[in-house]
Structure formats: structure tokens, C-alpha cells
Image: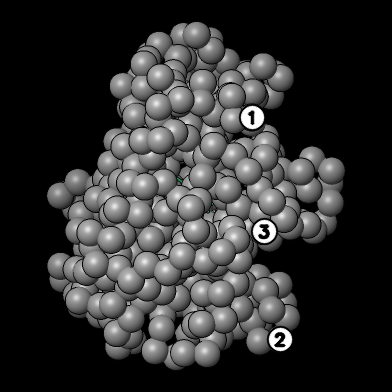
């Protein structure tokens, strides 16, 4: 695919605001916080507006005017452009006037990760990387393996031994990734991946601490805004694990406002499984920091994470948007998965159904009124995790 011009961008530390022109690093050498990409939005505004008028349908690269890629060729297998079906049955049951599902399971490898991966792997090609690396609860590894295959790169995935869904493992293996099983949970695998990337400059790390990933994933917000006829929802419910996606979607909405395409912003509602809820717990207790959980446990293996790397970005998203964080039990998740399948025709994996479980919780506690426009992010396809689907029947 050929792209035209890239916007001016730079990296900024989310902690001390130090600015970098170029960055292969993922955290600030001064304070250790994560980096984010920022644009000279003035110059990108006209290009972004133009891209909204082009034909060809929705896709991640439709928004290239706000993506940090300068090369002409991008590594794409058709990511983005996912549906936003409107609920009929469940909205009635919940007495909600507008409830939608952003069905990210429709991406090429069956999860939202493809949005970030197309940008991160394109960047990997730009800098001449030959091998890419990630730690994963499953979906990131499946996605990275597919995009690395497309780009002709080596893929190394670190997964917590015995703790990821078989379908995801199969995807990574079919796409030719080198799979390394790490003893312990995802958090341990991510620490190992970070150490490996620090030591070996030939390995390009594409976990969501890599700010290029966030840039691709923010396009979910742009698409929702277009699909709702240039309206932002009142609430966006997002399943939260490592906390990259909620940060990315919020960044997308904020950029729409900076471009003066919307005045309003949605409230971001982060939903965690109650057995893996370090962020939700810290938020509810009004703590400034998130303490890691040593043994997270939930049926939603994709979000079985005890030390969310992007917790600070996620906290900012929820606080700035005056949203909140919720916890839902495995029972509530499985129930929501079942409802999505039986009443809406959407087969979602358990982590994805956490967003709908969150809506039920929010309705039960009167957090949302019935006249609001609500979007649940359905992050990944149910076929990936057939073991869990068995218990949802
Ligand atoms: N839903 C699904 C299906 C996921 O795979 C993930 C994360 C999330 C939600 C949470 O997103 O981490 O950005 O807060 N999966 C990662 C992985 C961790 O390795 O596939 P997040």
C-alpha cells in the first residue's frame, strides 16, 4: 500500500514531559516512565480532513495523516474497518436507547491488536529490524506473528507457560513464530522480553509499551466517530489488561477534539476481571499508584495481568474523561459472553465480553442513565479460546 506524507511528530515522556525527536527506547531515561507520540496537529489537520472524504471504506490507514510512518509502503493485511452493530435485544433488556458493539474480532487475526501491529511492524521495517519480539497472553503473539510473516521477519513470542488459549498459540505457530514458554505469568514474560530487547539491539519489541502500537489502536476511536455519523459516544466500555488499548482509544478521541472535529468526549470505563484487577482496585481506593498483583486469576486469560505496564496512561484516560474503572466476576464475564452470542450473534472471547459485563454492572448501580449512547469494545473473537467457550454454553 502506498502512503503519501507523514505528519511531524515527536516523543514525549508521560511522566516528566521530556521530549525526544527520535526514540528506539520505550521508557524515559530520566524518570523511567513510558513515552507517547505527539503531533504538530496544525499541519496534519487539513490532510486528516481530506482523508475523511476519500472512498474505500474504513481502515487503519485511512487515518495515515495522523500515523507516525514516513515510508511509502506499509505492512497491511486489511486491519480496521470493523463493524459497529447496534444492539436490539440486549439494549431492550437493559432499557438503553443506544448500545453498540465495536466488533474487533473482525480484524485479520481476530483481535484489536492488528490495528497496532500494522503500524509497529511497518515501523520495524522502516528502521531495518529483522526480528520482532513480544510477550503475550495470546492475541499479541498471534497478531505479531502474522504481520512479521507478511513482512518477512523473524518473530519471537514469549508466553506464560500453560496459560494462553490454544487457538492463539496455534495462530502464532502457523504463522511461523518462534514460541518461548516462560515459567510464571504474563508479567514475568514481559519483564523478560524487555530485558532481551535492552540487551539485543537486533530485537524490536512490539508490546504496547511501544508507542507505535498505541497509534494504530487509537484509530478505533476515529472509526467509532465516523460510524456514529461524526458523534462520539457518551460512554466507551473497554476490557483492560495491560492497559494499552484504553489509553489508545482515549488518545484517539482527544486528537479528534484537538482537530476541532468534536467538542465532546466520551467517558472511558475500564473493565477488569475481579481476579486480575490491580487497576480497578487502585482506582476505587483513590490510590495514586497501582500495586502489582502477584497471582492474577480469571477465565479471561487475555487480561490475566497483575502489573499493567500502561497503568499511568489508563489512569489518565479514566480520570481526564471523568469515567471510572469496574470489576466483573468470571461468572459475570461468562454470562455476558453467552448473551453476546445468543442475543447479538457475536462470538467473543471472555476478555472481550468483560465490556458488556461492565455495562450490566453499571446499569445495576445506576452509573449510566437509559438515554446515553454506549459502545462496548469487543476486543477479540471467541473461536480463539474454545476451552473457555465450552463453559459459556
Ligand atoms: N481483550 C483482549 C482479547 C486482549 O487480548 C487484551 C490484551 C485485552 C482485552 C486488554 O488490552 O492489554 O491493551 O489493556 N491482550 C494482550 C496480549 C495483553 O498479549 O494479547 P490491554
Name the N-terminal-most of marks 3 and 2.
2
- Mark number, residue 307: 3
**At x 34% / y 29%, what residue is drawn?**
347
**At x 35% / y 51%, what residue is drawn?**
168
- Mark number, residue 378: none
Characterize the local packing of mark 1: few (<14), some (14-19) or many (20 or more) Cα atoms within 10 angstroms.
some
Above or below residue 82? Residue 67 is below
Name the N-terminal-most of marks 2 and 1.
2
Picture quadrant where residue 321 is located = top right
Q: For this view, does 344 lie left or right of residue 298?
A: left
Where in the figure is residue 280, as x and y percent of width and height? Answer: 71, 43
Q: Which residue is mark 2?
A: 30
Q: Is mark 1 within 8 Å of ligand 1?
A: no
Where in the figure is residue 23, as x and y percent of width and height? Answer: 50, 85
Q: Secondary structure at mark 3?
A: loop
Q: Secondary structure at mark 1?
A: loop
Picture quadrant where residue 113 is located = bottom left
**At x 72% / y 55%, what residue is drawn?**
294
Characterize the local packing of mark 2: few (<14), some (14-19) or many (20 or more) Cα atoms within 10 angstroms.
few
**At x 67% / y 58%, what residue is drawn?**
307
Q: Which residue is mark 1?
A: 329
Above or below residue 242? Residue 178 is below
Q: Could you tell me which quadrant the N terminus lies in?
A: bottom left
Of the pair 183 and 242, the residue shown nearer to us: 183
Q: Could you tell me which quadrant the C terminus lies in?
A: top left
Where in the figure is residue 104, as x and y percent of width and height? Answer: 35, 42
**Residue 64 appearing in the image:** no
Q: Secondary structure at mark 2?
A: loop
- CA distance for labels 1 and 3: 19 Å
Amino acid at each position: 500500500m502506498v502512503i503519501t506524507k507523514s505528519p511531524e511528530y515527536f516523543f514525549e515522556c508521560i511522566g516528566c514531559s521530556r521530549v525526544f525527536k527520535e526514540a528506539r527506547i520505550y521508557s524515559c531515561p530520566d524518570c523511567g516512565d513510558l513515552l507517547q507520540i505527539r503531533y504538530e496537529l496544525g499541519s496534519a489537520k487539513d490532510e486528516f480532513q481530506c482523508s475523511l472524504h476519500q472512498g474505500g471504506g474504513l481502515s487503519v490507514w485511512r487515518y495515515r495523516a495522523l500515523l507516525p510512518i514516513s515510508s511509502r509502503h506499509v505492512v497491511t493485511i486489511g486491519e480496521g474497518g470493523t463493524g459497529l452493530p447496534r444492539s436490539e435485544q440486549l439494549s431492550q433488556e437493559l432499557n438503553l436507547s443506544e448500545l453498540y458493539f465495536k466488533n474487533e474480532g473482525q480484524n485479520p487475526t481476530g483481535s484489536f491488536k492488528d490495528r497496532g501491529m500494522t503500524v509497529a511492524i511497518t515501523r520495524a521495517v522502516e528502521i531495518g529490524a529483522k526480528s520482532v519480539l513480544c510477550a503475550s497472553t495470546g492475541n499479541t503473539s498471534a497478531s505479531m506473528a502474522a504481520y512479521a510473516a507478511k513482512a518477512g521477519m523473524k518473530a519471537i513470542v514469549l508466553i506464560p507457560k500453560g496459560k494462553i488459549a490454544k487457538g492463539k498459540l496455534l495462530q502464532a505457530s502457523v504463522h511461523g513464530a518462534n514460541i518461548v514458554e516462560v515459567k510464571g505469568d504474563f508479567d514475568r514474560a514481559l519483564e523478560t522480553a524487555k530485558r532481551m530487547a535492552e540487551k539485543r539491539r537486533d530485537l524490536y519489541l512490539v508490546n504496547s509499551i511501544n508507542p507505535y502500537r498505541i497509534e494504530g489502536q487509537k484509530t478505533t476511536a476515529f472509526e467509532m466517530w465516523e460510524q456514529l455519523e461524526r458523534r462520539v459516544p457518551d460512554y466507551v466500555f473497554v476490557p483492560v489488561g495491560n492497559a494499552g488499548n484504553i489509553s489508545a482509544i482515549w488518545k484517539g478521541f482527544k486528537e479528534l477534539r484537538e482537530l476541532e472535529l468534536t467538542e465532546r468526549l466520551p467517558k472511558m470505563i475500564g473493565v477488569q476481571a475481579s481476579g486480575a484487577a490491580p487497576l480497578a482496585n487502585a482506582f476505587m481506593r483513590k490510590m495514586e499508584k497501582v500495586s502489582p498483583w502477584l497471582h492474577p486469576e480469571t477465565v479471561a486469560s487475555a487480561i490475566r495481568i497483575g502489573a499493567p505496564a500502561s497503568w499511568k496512561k489508563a489512569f489518565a484516560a479514566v480520570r481526564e474523561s471523568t469515567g471510572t474503572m469496574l470489576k466483573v466476576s468470571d461468572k459475570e464475564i461468562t454470562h455476558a459472553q453467552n448473551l453476546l452470542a445468543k442475543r447479538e450473534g457475536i462470538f467473543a472471547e471472555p476478555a472481550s465480553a468483560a465490556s458488556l459485563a461492565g455495562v450490566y454492572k453499571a446499569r445495576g448501580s445506576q452509573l449510566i442513565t437509559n438515554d446515553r449512547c454506549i459502545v462496548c469494545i469487543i476486543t477479540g473473537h471467541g473461536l480463539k479460546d474454545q476451552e473457555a467457550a465450552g463453559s459459556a454454553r
